Image (cartoon, grey):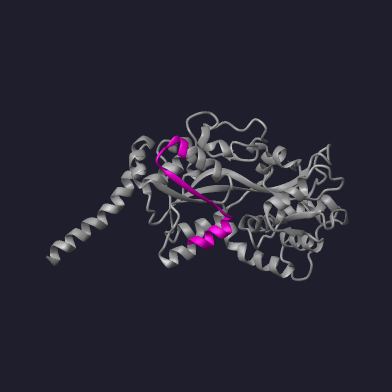
Amino acid sequence: MNRILSIATSIGLLAAPALAQELDTLSPEALLPLAQKEAKVTVYSFTSRIARVEEAFEKAYPGIDLIGFDMSSTEMITRLRTEAAAGIPNADVIYVSDAPVVLGELLSTGLLKNYVPPRVAGDLDDAYKSPLLAQRLSTKVLMYNEEAHKDGSPIKNLWDLTTPDWTGKVVMVDPLQRGDYLDLMTEFVLRSEEMANAYQTRFGKPIELDEGVETAGHQFIVDLFQNDLVLLASTDDVNAAIGKIGQENPPVGFTSYSDRRDNEDEGWALQVANDVAPSNGIVFPALLGLTEGTKSPAAARLVIDFLMGDDSETGGQGYAPFYVAGDWATRKDITGHPDAIPLADFTGWRIDPARTAELRKSVGDLVLQLQ
């Protein structure tokens, strides 16, 4: 009897990976009846746009309840760690930014699994298929109020932000509360040579570092905070501070280029500063993954397939919330938004998650000291 149980157990252990591998090859049509048996799927999302995805998904696939939770990537990562430690995973799909932590920890420790829908695999560059699927590219960049500055951005060089003209008039979310803003701070350090060159262009002399300051990127962060950088609680607060219509002398700040989509609804006049030396900020991937131990493996794969868009030029209903100026699809067959600056012409730095991960803690320590 013990030998029979042992054999049965071995077969069961082999069956689970085989099933996962089989699911990875199935079309949406083949996944659907399996997903309908599972009946529900839970998505942790770093964007509130998951509400629109939820509505469209449930309309496209009746019988499956998509439960979406909107939270920052930092909060999401903390929750995933806690749930994994307690052995009670609640999410099936993770839609997340903060690639340095996600790729460096969650993926490498097995909390997340990669899944690339076979339907779209041929339309993605290898860099967007591995080590984790990237759905789109997003930003944290310098934005201004285009109603107040009709001739374009009032900032031409990042070092302008450290001058008396902009004292107390630069806003952003606290980098210690949101990982993508800490990635932005880290990128200034990684691009120190460019920051030094921009300093000389702006002030007509080589940069002189304060005692104990290592690089031009570190010096920029120090000078920015010492010029009364204003830290706000949320991206919406930042957007309203910068973009609210009717301001005579609004601040500038770092936020998401794609938030221009809300200008009409919110009464904002947000615009990206794309002609800033040496860069306006960072461009980073929005990542999709399966959680380890998902209870709805078929529905989870169906959601990821849906989020990657249909076969139309704009990606259809699954991609509709992200087909906006300021987001760029990773799929080569989805056309760019007509109002967007083409990615090739955008001045944001592309982050290298591995290099960012190496420096993030030390940059975070500096930000903590400056606060």
Q: Position of residue 346 (x, y in %)?
A: 67, 40
**Residue 125 to residue 230: above or below:** above
Q: Position of residue 188 (x, y in %)?
A: 69, 56
Q: Position of residue 301 (x, y in %)?
A: 41, 44
Q: Is 247 left or right of 284, judged from the image as shown?
A: right
Q: Position of residue 343 (x, y in %)?
A: 63, 38
Q: Is 118 left or right of 170, judged from the image as shown?
A: left
> In the rendered structure, which segment of residues is drawn in magenta?
58-80
Q: Residue at x 82, y 54 (%)?
A: 169
The N terminus: image quadrant: bottom left
User: Does the image show residue 131?
Assistant: no
User: Does the image show residue 327?
Assistant: yes
In this orientation, which residue lies closer to the viewer: 29 or 367?
29
In this orientation, which residue lies closer to the viewer: 211 or 17?
17
In this orientation, which residue lies closer to the viewer: 83 or 22?
83
Q: Is 106 left or right of 214, judged from the image as shown?
A: left
**Residue 296 to residue 125: above or below:** below
Is residue 62 shown in magenta? yes
Q: Residue at x 79, y 48 (%)?
A: 157
